[in-house]
């Protein structure tokens, strides 16, 4: 049995492969001292348009700056797609990315491929082998594939005659030990060489699946420090060593334990990898973990939005591979795929000559609740609630505004019981969702999302991001209110992306000549006129 630690490669999905030198040096020393056999240092890529750190490319020039300790065999991974989709021939693409083994500090190259890419991958394996490398091949998203399909891919791999180890990967993190054994059995009908497994921990089964694979003859086990890896991460190297220690292991676990405590536990708290309920739900529904990772990494989205997006993605075909455009659609929560941008003139002039108070759920709404209730009762503004208010009684609210399906779905029963109008973009909601509020007065005002734009017309508005507060402000441009005050627009830290997003919204709103001065009656970090809910109304 051999362990391959791929922390710098798989973990790079959390920090753009931009590891601090201190961490890298400590990591390299620890894995060497632990007697782990293989270390995958990163990826090989052609240039990308975004900034990525050294281990997204792991160039020969960068490798030559590293003091690689003796002991492990070092390697990199390349995606088959990187080679197959380049404008070069396969041989030229490989030669552009790799020098002969005799000129490199790495000895192992693993190729990661989806099942449809297998039949085109033979020349990649052949060229890398001719350069002198140990060559591994990873079958991604192996779970759920039929035994016949798996066996056929193993047959093709065998016919290359140049492959050293064949891997299968639990890319979606939804395998169990029975599935691991089934896949190994299917692979063994054709492939007699070494087998490897790469597990993901979405459902908390990474370690169990690695051990199940070991028990049925899989001899290469992938792991990462603290499980650092895409989505929920991988089998934890330290946990694997702890289990093996019970059987007089050849490995030394203490250097890895020290590495975890000194460097990786703090990184894990910062970046947040590891299994949780949302990764579990994604795995159950065959949703690629990168969708979940990107949802969790954006602090703008709450649990309702994320769960709603997972539900939407689970109903689509093709979400076993990540697609950013599909994620954007899921976050807009527009399940009515045939809907066209539409709306009515229901909000035009609706707030003419009115004192408008916009309320949102926030800590200050609760903190100053008594003063807010007194203010509403005393001055009787037209109260607009962004989504269902958790604090303000329904009888004090005149209109509810919603633009997110997830928010609507989480509060659907509460909306059914309302006897106040709801303003929302009807075209974004499915028929069955509209039926939930069939008996509620609905004012349809359309919504479109376009970067760097906030404007309105008779039937719909355009806002820069899918934020209900922006929808409300754009809607108000179609009226001439006497005043616009806010409650609960607390804001965030200056460097928070949500703060920057809202500041941009207010900036775009103020640039419209129809805009009103906005006064915040509770504390705020936004660039709004400051007022107080306690001040007398003049």
Image: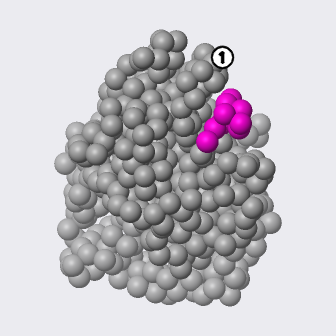
Question: Looking at the picture, how far across and down is residue 233, in whole percent?
Answer: 57, 48
Question: Looking at the picture, how far across and down is residue 374, in whole percent?
Answer: 63, 18
- Give the tally of numbered discs: 1
Instruction: Farthest residue to the front: give it.
Output: 353
- Graded by Cα atoms within 10 Å as few (under 14), some (14 to 19) or many (20 or more), the crowding at tag 1 reads few
Callout 1 secondary element: helix
Please provide the residue range marked out in magenta.
389-398
Q: Quadrant of residue 14?
A: top left
377 within the magenta span? no
Q: Quadrant of residue 218?
A: bottom right
Q: Is 526 positioned to the left or the right of 223 in the image? A: left
Residue drawn 63% across and 52% down? 421
Residue 354 vs residue 140, the one in the foreground = 354
Residue 310 vs residue 239, the one in the foreground = 310
Residue drawn 52% across and 86% down? 156
Residue drawn 61% across and 53% down? 422
Residue 63 visible? The answer is no
Q: Quadrant of residue 93?
A: bottom left
Label 1 belongs to which residue? 370
| Main SS category, magenta section | loop
Residue 228 vs residue 310, the one in the foreground = 310
Question: Looking at the picture, how far across and down is residue 353, in whole percent?
Answer: 42, 40
Please determine whether, in this image, residue 27 is positioned above or below residue 134: above
Residue 300 visible? The answer is yes
């Amino acid at each position: 049995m051999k362990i391959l630690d791929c922390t710098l490669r798989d973990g790079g999905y959390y920090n753009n492969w931009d590891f601090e030198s201190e961490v890298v040096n400590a990591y390299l020393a620890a894995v060497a001292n632990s007697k782990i056999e293989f270390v995958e240092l990163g990826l090989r890529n052609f240039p990308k348009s975004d900034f990525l750190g050294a281990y997204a490319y792991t160039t020969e020039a960068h490798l030559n700056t590293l003091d690689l300790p003796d002991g492990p065999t070092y390697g990199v991974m390349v995606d088959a797609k990187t080679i197959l989709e380049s404008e070069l021939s396969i041989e030229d693409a490989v030669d552009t990315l790799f020098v002969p083994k005799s000129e490199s500090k790495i000895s192992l190259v693993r190729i990661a491929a989806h099942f449809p890419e297998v039949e085109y991958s033979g020349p990649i394996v052949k060229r890398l082998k001719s350069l002198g490398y140990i060559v591994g091949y990873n079958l991604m998203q192996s779970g759920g594939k039929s035994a016949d399909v798996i066996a056929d891919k193993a047959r093709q791999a065998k016919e290359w005659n140049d492959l050293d180890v064949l891997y299968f990967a639990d890319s979606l993190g939804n395998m169990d030990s029975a599935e691991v054994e089934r896949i190994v059995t299917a692979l063994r009908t054709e492939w007699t060489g070494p087998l490897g497994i790469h597990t993901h921990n979405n459902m908390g089964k990474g370690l169990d699946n690695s051990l199940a694979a070991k028990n049925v003859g899989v001899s290469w086990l992938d792991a990462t420090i603290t499980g650092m890896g895409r989505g929920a991460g991988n089998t934890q190297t330290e946990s694997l060593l702890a289990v093996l220690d019970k059987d007089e292991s050849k490995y030394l676990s203490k250097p890895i334990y020290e590495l975890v405590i000194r460097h990786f536990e703090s990184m894990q708290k910062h970046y947040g990898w590891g299994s949780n309920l949302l990764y579990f739900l994604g795995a159950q529904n065959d949703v690629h973990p990168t969708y979940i990772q990107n949802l969790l990494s954006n602090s703008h989205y709450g649990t309702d939005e994320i769960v709603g997006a997972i539900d939407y993605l689970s109903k689509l075909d093709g979400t076993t591979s990540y697609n950013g455009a599909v994620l954007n659609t899921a976050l807009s929560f527009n399940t009515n795929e045939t809907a066209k941008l539409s709306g009515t003139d229901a909000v035009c002039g609706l707030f003419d000559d009115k004192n408008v108070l916009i309320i949102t759920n926030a800590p200050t709404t609760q903190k100053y609740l008594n003063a807010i209730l007194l203010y509403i009762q005393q001055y009787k503004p037209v109260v607009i609630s962004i989504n269902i208010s958790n604090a303000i009684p329904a009888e004090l609210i005149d209109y509810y505004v919603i633009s997110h399906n997830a928010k609507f779905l989480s509060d659907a029963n509460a909306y059914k019981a309302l006897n106040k109008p709801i303003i929302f973009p009807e075209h974004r909601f499915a028929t069955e969702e509209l039926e939930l509020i069939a008996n509620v007065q609905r004012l349809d005002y359309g919504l479109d999302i376009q970067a760097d734009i906030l404007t309105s017309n008779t039937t719909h508005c355009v806002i820069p991001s899918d934020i209900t507060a922006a929808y409300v402000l754009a809607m108000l441009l179609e009226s001439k209110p006497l005043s616009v005050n806010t409650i609960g627009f607390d804001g965030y830290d200056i460097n928070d992306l949500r703060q920057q997003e809202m500041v941009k919204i207010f900036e775009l709103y103020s640039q419209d000549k129809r805009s009103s001065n906005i006064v915040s009656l509770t504390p705020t970090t936004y660039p709004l006129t400051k007022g107080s809910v306690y001040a007398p109304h003049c």
